[in-house]
Amino acid sequence: MSNDRTAAVIGGGMAGMAAAYRLQQAGFEPTVFETRDRVGGRIWTVRKGDFLMDLGTAVYLGTYRDAIAMIHEVGLSDQFVEREATGAMLRDGKVHHFDYTTPLRTALGTKAISWPSKVKALKLAALTIRSRRGLGYDTYDALAELDTETVRRYCRRELNEELLQYCGRPLVSGTWVADDAETSLALMLWTIRNMLVPNVYNLTSGVIGLPNELARRVKVRYQHTVTNVSDDGATVEVSFDADASEQSERFDACVIATTAEPALEIFPQMDDNHRDLYSTARYRRLGSICLGLSKRPTDPATYVLGALCEDPDTIAVIADHHKAPGRAPEGKGLLTVLLTHEYLNRTDHLSDEEVIAYAIDRASLYHGDISGDVEETMVVRWPESVPALGVGRFRQIAAFKHRLDYSARVQFASDLDRIPGLNGALVSGQEAAGRIAGAVTTGASAAAATAP
Ligand SMILES: Cc1cc2nc3c(=O)[nH]c(=O)nc-3n(C[C@H](O)[C@H](O)[C@H](O)COP(=O)(O)OP(=O)(O)OC[C@H]3O[C@@H](n4cnc5c(N)ncnc54)[C@H](O)[C@@H]3O)c2cc1C
């Protein structure tokens, strides 16, 4: 099929790549403008020595239905791997393991939580079960109804301090880098329903495998930084810096798939609905430190959630060698230590070597002394990992959804207007492409209908 309508996609993260791919299928010729020399954005996999390191997004979960469907659709089934995942958490200096394949037995049997607290936790289980219909990917109105108080306030009011410290707080911090003192209860309930799953999925080429495959199918202009987008009512002019000069091109439509700040900067015509959402977005910082090891640690946990009351700077420690084959050679190990927003805020002055030394120290708490085994390291201090979902944000998102302008030829895609993460970004991109296809087709037929 020859695609005679053109669309610009600004940003080659998961949202932008999904939008470009779906636009191409809808009959457009998409061009992705990406400021970096790679696609993926906050998805980034690199090979260093013997190790394949996911420096951004760590896993695909079973609940990422759209992402998994796209993986198969674009022919990556032979790279797709599923692994059972064991969770763990520190309590009084000891690592406790959780088997998510038998959640009830695990919850009753664990010594990480006392019996009186287990009884109290029934209240939380009952609330999650009662709310389950509203805890989906497309249930913003229902999530808005649960968006009533912070995780900390709910836990202290309805549960107890132990459940706050060893359940509520690690759940939202370990999965969303979130602060329990401001994060909405709705996010914790959503997480319990969707993220405590027994399996993790990945690609043998790394999480980046999917955006990379999409980049083979659509035109991507790397190191092209968009500086302005302007809608004249008939076409969209995109201005960009490339090869040390400012250039511009016209397209029939455009999807802006960047984080909040660049989107606000490059499109002064942004409507009030998006402006309200984007200008109030706040992201959490996250330190991602990958440690390639000459000796594989013996602990079976794929994902250790940090209990911040015991280890205040550690979000999680991921054993990548359990995550998928090929991350580390047989006998060698690969760990990723995720350090908190607050840690990054107070250590901007530290060198990478100092941050790595600290990460080795943190990992040793869970996996024994690994300091003599470290062969390769990578450190990324992400300025933006996941948007914060404070109390009121789900209500704001639900209202935003109701006010979306489906007819605009400039649409937006990101992880800002939904449950964030790779799957949310991908769905956002698909939806933006769908709106463009509908809007531009409707516009074209309206023009044809009124033509003399
Ligand atoms: C360390 C880390 C771990 C994570 N772990 C997980 C996980 O396990 N599971 C999960 O689901 N999610 C995880 N996330 C979150 C997930 O990565 C994001 O929610 C998702 O990738 C966001 O995709 P996006 O396309 O909306 O944005 P981005 O990936 O940020 O993409 C935006 C793109 O726009 C480009 N851009 C910006 N300005 C311009 C401009 N002016 N011109 C051209 N291009 C521009 C950027 O370079 C970037 O490529 C993690 C994030 C981090 C940082």
Image: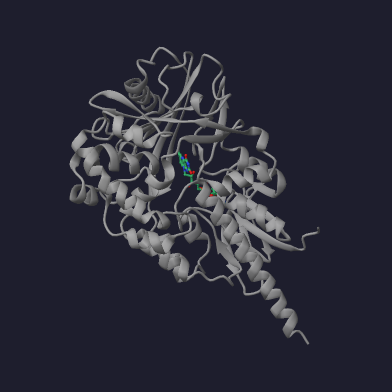
How many badges with numbers are in the image?
0
What's the coloring here? one colour
Image height of 359 relative to 297, above or below: below
Residue drawn 58% across the image and 61% down it: 432
Write down the quadrant of residue 363 in the picture: top left
In the foreground, 133 or 206: 133
Write down the quadrant of residue 350 in the picture: top left
Viewport quadrant of the N terminus? bottom right
In the foreground, 30 or 167: 167
Residue drawn 73% across the image and 83% down it: 449
- In this picture, residue 1 sits left or right of residue 95: right
Residue drawn 44% across the image and 39% down it: 197
Residue 158 % position (x, y): 20, 50
Q: Is residue 237 visible?
A: no
Residue 46 % position (x, y): 56, 30
Q: Residue furthest bottom?
A: 452
Q: Is residue 441 visible?
A: yes
